[in-house]
Image (cartoon, helix red, strand yellow):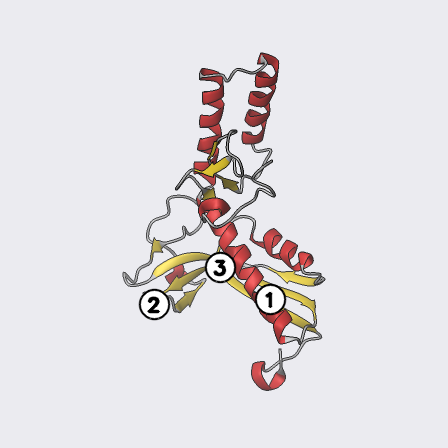
């Protein structure tokens, strides 16, 4: 921040993020900053009910006007209607992080761009979380109901491992189906169209280092 532009100054570069509240935000952002080699000196992370107008502008924060008419559970629900029919109550995560001072415009642009990418990844992973666990359950049922021609002990171990993953022992970030063609000369794996979930919802994203493996 600069006094002439922001009205205050700091020995650090400030990263401020406003996002719909969801799991994994702080961990994902701090891991990305660490990946870029930036030390994080301070994190402030309040969560607040925000009243947004039809164009996304903030018209209220944390007051009685930000309380939704109906509460399906404790706390304001994202997207709940407010007293003003034209406005929406959103539970938002307000993140303030301080990192080592950076002045290079290219470095600042990289920080911004990579954090935006991470936030998109978090959003799709959270949105598809239940669908990915359902696919994990389907895979287990398929292995049990129509077992492949492998050693039964190996199959039992695989099924047990998949069930363990689904029992809150693993954070599922992506899912995608592939058709396997062992006779193919160059690429034995063919992506099943529209099968991707989470981060792999984007067909351009790949996680396999080598499709031949």
* x and y, in percent, of residue 14 in the image: 63, 70
Closer to the chain start, of discs 1 and 2, is 2
Closer to the chain start, of discs 1 and 3, is 3
Q: Residue at x 33, y 58 (%)?
A: 82
Mark 2–mark 3 distance (CA, rounded to whole Å): 16 Å
Q: Secondary structure under badge 3?
A: strand
Residue 19 circle label = 3
* x and y, in percent, of residue 157 in the image: 61, 19
Label 1, on which residue? 110
The answer to whether residue 189 is above or below residue 139 is below
Q: Residue at x 65, y 59 (%)?
A: 33
* Horizontal relation, residue 68 to residue 113: left or right: left
Front one among 202 and 127: 202
Mark 1–mark 2 distance (CA, rounded to whole Å): 28 Å
* x and y, in percent, of residue 118 in the image: 55, 55
Closer to the chain start, of discs 2 and 3, is 3
The N terminus lies in quadrant: bottom right
The answer to whether residue 9 is above or below residue 127 is below
Residue 46 circle label = none
The C terminus lies in quadrant: top right
């Amino acid at each position: 921040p600069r006094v002439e532009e922001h009205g205050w100054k700091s020995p650090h570069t400030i990263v401020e993020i406003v996002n719909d509240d969801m799991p994994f935000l702080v961990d994902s952002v701090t891991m990305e900053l660490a990946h870029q080699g930036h030390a994080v000196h301070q994190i402030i992370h309040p969560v607040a009910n925000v009243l947004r107008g039809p164009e996304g502008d903030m018209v209220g924060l944390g007051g009685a006007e930000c309380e939704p008419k109906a509460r399906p559970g404790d706390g304001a629900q994202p997207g709940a209607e407010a007293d003003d029919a034209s406005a929406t109550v959103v539970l938002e995560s307000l993140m303030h992080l301080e990192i080592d001072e950076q002045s290079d415009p290219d470095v600042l642009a990289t920080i911004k761009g990579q954090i935006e990418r991470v936030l998109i990844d978090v959003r799709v992973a959270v949105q598809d979380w239940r669908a990915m666990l359902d696919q994990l359950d389907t895979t287990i049922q398929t292995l049990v109901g129509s077992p492949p021609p492998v050693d039964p002990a190996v199959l039992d171990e695989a099924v047990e491992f998949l069930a363990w993953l689904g029992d809150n022992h693993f954070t599922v970030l992506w899912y995608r189906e592939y058709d396997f063609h062992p006779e193919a000369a160059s690429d034995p794996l063919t992506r099943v169209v529209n099968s991707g979930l989470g981060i792999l919802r984007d067909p351009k994203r790949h996680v396999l280092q080598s499709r031949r493996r």
